[in-house]
Amino acid sequence: MKKIAMIGVALCATLSFLLAQTPKKPAGSQSSVTRGKKVYEQYCLTCHQVDGSGVPHLNPPLIKTSFVLGDKGKLIQVILKGMQASEPIDDEYYSNNMPPHNFLKDQEIADVLTYVRRNFGNKASAVTTADVKTARAKN
Amino acid sequence: MKTNVVLLGCLSLLSASCLADNGDSSAIHRSAGADQANAGLKLPAGFKAQVVAENLGAARHIAVTPLGDIYVKIQSSKPGKAIAVLHPTGSGKPDAVKTFGTYRGTGMVIKDHYLYTSSDEDVYRYQLNDKFEVMHPDQPEKIVTGLINRHQHESKSIALDNAGNIYVNIGAYSNSCQQQDRAKGSKGIPGCPILDSAAGIWQFKADKLNQTYGDGVRYATGLRNVVGLDWNTAQNQLFVMQHGRDGLFDMFPEYYDLQQGNELPAECMYALKKGDNAGWPYIYYDGIQHKKMLSPEYGGDGKKTGGADAIDPVVAFPAHMAPNGLLFYTGNQFPERYKNGAFIAFHGSWNRQKGQKGYYVVFVPFKDGKPSGNWEVFADNFTGVENIQSPGQAQHRPCGLAQGPDGALYVTDDVKGTVYKISYSGK
């Protein structure tokens, strides 16, 4: 009986291990995603929502939009400078202005954008602090 | 036995991990008790709901003619899709939907022999024939033009009195008149300049062409954004529903916790007289303390009161629920207690955290022009989901209200473009 229980535990551990390994994410960015989730919850969630779906006609979704999946430099500038309601996103207009979030640290911006680009069904490359530094230097 | 327990434990671990992977609190739970007999809505006993039309697009405000034809303002800039016309047949459903006009917008009112509508910058009217049909769909008269539209709070909702005037909401293109809109800790602009051309109700003549700011009167000010408004004929007075400000917790966490951010400020109903000031952006109304509070952008700290010259609301509702439709019921079909009372369509919140609120039509009983009881939920279950976390999950969101010639209540939904007809039979 004890033996069977041991096998059960081993099986369980193996399964959990396998589960934790999928889906495979590049090494190093996992901790960035974890930190980015915290930044998202503090500064982004109210407007862009818990599931990244935004608010219809008011706040844009973060799910597979050209801004989120596209050029990293352009996306970082949205965080640094904010975005005016007069600017369309994939041909849709959203009524609310986004304020600048230039008070966030380079690491926080890299983390939150990596989180957004890897979450909500998005699959795009990580954003690094070097990317953020480059974008900041352009302003 | 032990094996089973271990395996069971393993399975539950498995399923827990799977659930966690799918994104925790955003999971949608289908409402189990939806009553399809009432178009999925939950209503008081004796009321029935029917779907008159579906898939109209973003159906905003609505008006019903004395002969029962239905006009719906669609928020779309697609050519020829601004207004939908429904002519219900014997079944209560229209045989076909006709559309005309090319402009976004929300406003839609029938007064005498005219249909009044609004884009996000202008107000139009169309003459109706003796069957209350629009005579020249391609030739509206532009009665007001050039109203400010900076995307935020852009709806120019309208109401008419019985003295030839039309009242137009011009919403503030800002949350709280900060130097930097919605930025954390940003101060309010002294002597908020937005109030000159927006954040109020303007009065114009209903029959004069091409009026703009100089021709109108700023009838009431200090109203952040009004989408639902109605002329109360029993009181001969304009009543409005204000969309209260956002972001007390997000922008000023030093003064407000998450719970306070969720519950403040109240969504307010105001009864307006010419010259009234409701206090935006300098104050907001705290519906829990029943006090006008100084805004944190203007020196407030969650404790200081303000707005000595600002009017008090007639009714204070929970925060952030977005009242988009207001209708004073004058029909004879519903039971006596509904007569002259107010129906309000709440579009539903987005900027609460850990659960949204609203997404229903409420009723407030009135007697002698004042509320005679607490507000109550009248029609619920528009979202089709329980514990809604995000507005994107809502299958329907109530927006506009109208009363039919038989006394039925019509409600629009701007997610799927549904028009509901709610009737009372007593059964």
Image (cartoon, coloured by chain):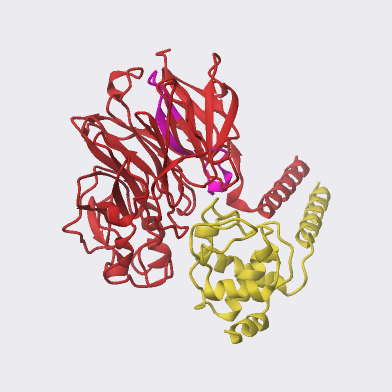
Chain colours: A yellow, B red
Boundaries of the magenta span: B387-410
User: Where is the N terminus of chain B found, in terms of image quarters?
Assistant: top right
Q: Position of residue B181 (x, y in %)?
A: 42, 67
**A52, above or below A83, in the image:** above
Q: How many marks?
A: 0
Please tell me which residue is depicted at 74% across the width and 49% down the height of the picture: B10
Q: Is residue B291 left or right of residue A3?
A: left
Q: Position of residue B206 (x, y in %)?
A: 32, 40
Please say whether residue B31 is visible from this viewpoint: no
Q: Position of residue B83 (x, y in %)?
A: 52, 37
User: In the image, is residue A93 part of the stretch drawn in magenta?
Assistant: no
Please tell me which residue is depicted at 28% across the width and 49% down the height of the picture: B287
User: In the image, is residue B406 part of the stretch drawn in magenta?
Assistant: yes
Asked where in the image residue B7 lies, by quadrant, the reply is top right
Asked where in the image residue B335 lies, by quadrant, the reply is top left
User: Where is the C terminus of chain B found, in terms of image quarters?
Assistant: top left
Please tell me which residue is depicted at 42% across the width and 54% down the height of the picture: B153
